Amino acid sequence: MLIQSFRMTALGALMLGVSAVASAGVVAGTYDGSADGKLSRVTTSVTLDAEGRLSDVKLDVSGETPALGGAAASRMAPEMVRTQSVAVDGVSGATVTSEAIRTAVKTAIAKAGADISRYEVKVAKAVGADEVISADVVVVGAGASGTAAALAAAEGGAKVVVLEKTPSVGGAGRIASGLFAVESKLQKEKFKNQPELLKELTYR
């Protein structure tokens, strides 16, 4: 009877110990994570407290496109801390970088011994107020072609509205913007003292 009582006490102590370990599964501290982005390796430094709460998320996306990857980092990091979730909205036009940010942060959280599913709760999206806009021409997509079409319509006297989901206009034209300046007055002005170079900067 004494042996049985001892066994029950030992079992109870063991179960309490397991419970304590389970509740303290997250080891407070700062952990690093990384993932492949669009143009570079995205890295993060994530700080969790003893309760597993995200207290800080730092991101390095310096190798990504500043206007897109940079925008994703500046928006997503504070939102992850505010909502305690990695399932925050990414940035349109920076889908690959946004996903790399989520993966890097989850990798860091896992190193703390946390249950990743706890941080994958979907965050409700804010819905803006409805707005009615009238126009003669609506251009959907402000890429190189869309902006050119909008400009042509506006020059023709039409009232134009351009819709673009990314934080900047120009699309791929922003990457190859130099091509649109070839033999332009802007190019000639900039290199007016370099006539030999101007001869090479031509579309012919």
Image (cartoon, helix red, strand yellow):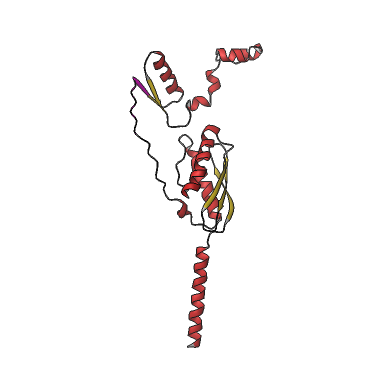
What is the chief secondary structure element of the magenta stretch?
A: loop
Q: Is residue 11 above or below residue 78?
A: below
Specify the quadrant of the image occupied by residue 126.
top left
Q: Residue at x 61, y 15 (%)?
A: 190
Image: magenta residue range: 130-138
Q: Position of residue 54 (x, y in %)?
A: 52, 51
Q: Position of residue 133 (x, y in %)?
A: 34, 26
Q: Residue at x 55, y 33 (%)?
A: 66
Task: Please provide percent x and percent y for residue 38.
Answer: 53, 37
In the rendered image, residue 132 lying in the magenta stretch gets the answer yes
- Decide which of 155, 100 is in the foreground and name it: 155
Q: Picture coordinates of residue 19 (x, y %)?
A: 49, 68
Q: Is residue 35 above or below residue 137?
A: below
> Residue sitting at 50 percent across and 24 percent down?
173
Q: Is residue 68 left or right of residue 139?
A: right
Name the residue at 51% across, 75% down. Answer: 13
For the image, the number of numbered tags is 0
157 in relation to 60, above or below:
above
The one nearer the camera, 11 or 200, is: 11
Quarter of image, res 143? top left
Residue closest to the far bottom: 1
Which quadrant: the C terminus? top right
Q: Is residue 101 magenta?
A: no
